[in-house]
Amino acid sequence: MVEAGETLVMIDCGFSLRETVRRMERLGVDPAQLQGILVTHEHTDHCSGVSALSRKYQIPVYLTHGTLGSGRCDNAFDVTLFNSDHHFTIGGMDIQAVAVPHDAREPCQYRLSHNSLSLGVLTDLGSITDHVIASYTGCDALLLEFNHDLHMLQAGSYPQHLKRRVAGDWGHLNNLQAADLLLKINHVGLRELVVAHISEKNNSREMAEQALSLVLPSLEKVTWAEQKLGFDWLELA
């Protein structure tokens, strides 16, 4: 969830309705406060709970034409369609959709801005493009995928076709790719960095920290998103 002024939005929802409400209550939020759900792509862990949540609380849903075409967000409430790379506003929040290389129909990620502050959300991409670098340069805060350690993935239990998918150019970022992106987007100005989308089988906090230590002088401003608890509110001011 991202809040700016009087505007509150959620990016993706892969939980059941009950679990989503429970997690929102932990952060002091009533689902009826949401003014929009932004969907990145149609994979189950990102969209399976979108339609139920939006119908229950009459929350508008924003997604690309390709994502809607997957059929996995059918029956959502008040759908707004856009092309990846489209710019739009919700309340007092400016939102830039960013096209990314991922094995989905029309995936995107988001950069959200309010007044002079901007937050980048970047997960589910298999390679770093010049467009991605340009789109996330200068963010004040960034939630970034550190999905896997390449050696752990290759030595792990996944079948070969899944290993190729995860490590491929249309899969997920490994630790070194994510760390390299930080170098390329001028990370010095980041006030907050959230490490997210960490594989439970193919990564560890220790391995991600090793990669981060190559590019960051300190890990003091790094927040680790946990699958069971997520993380608490972070404030930019």
Image (spheres, rainbow, N blue to C red):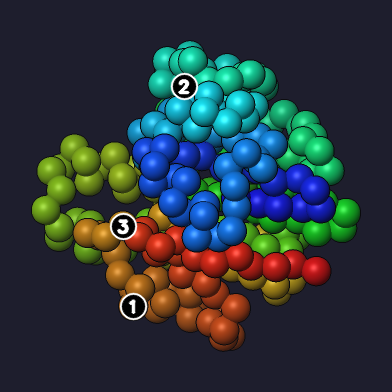
Q: Can see residue 178?
A: no
Q: Earlier in the sequence, mark 3 or mark 2?
A: 2
The residues bearing labels 1 and 2 have C-alpha atoms spaced at a distance of 36 Å
107 relative to 152, above or below: above
Which numbered marker is on residue 73? 2
The quarter of the picture where residue 52 lies is: top left
Amino acid bearing label 1:
Glu
Q: Earlier in the sequence, mark 1 or mark 2?
A: 2
Amino acid bearing label 3:
Ser
Quadrant the C terminus occupies: bottom right
Which numbered marker is on residue 199? 3
Q: Nearer the viewer, residue 196 or 176?
A: 196
Which numbered marker is on residue 206? 1
The quarter of the picture where residue 234 lies is: bottom right
Q: Nearer the viewer, mark 3 or mark 2?
A: 2
Element type where label 2 sits in the image: loop
Which numbered marker is on residue 32? none
Is there CB contact under 8 Å for labels 1 and 2?
no
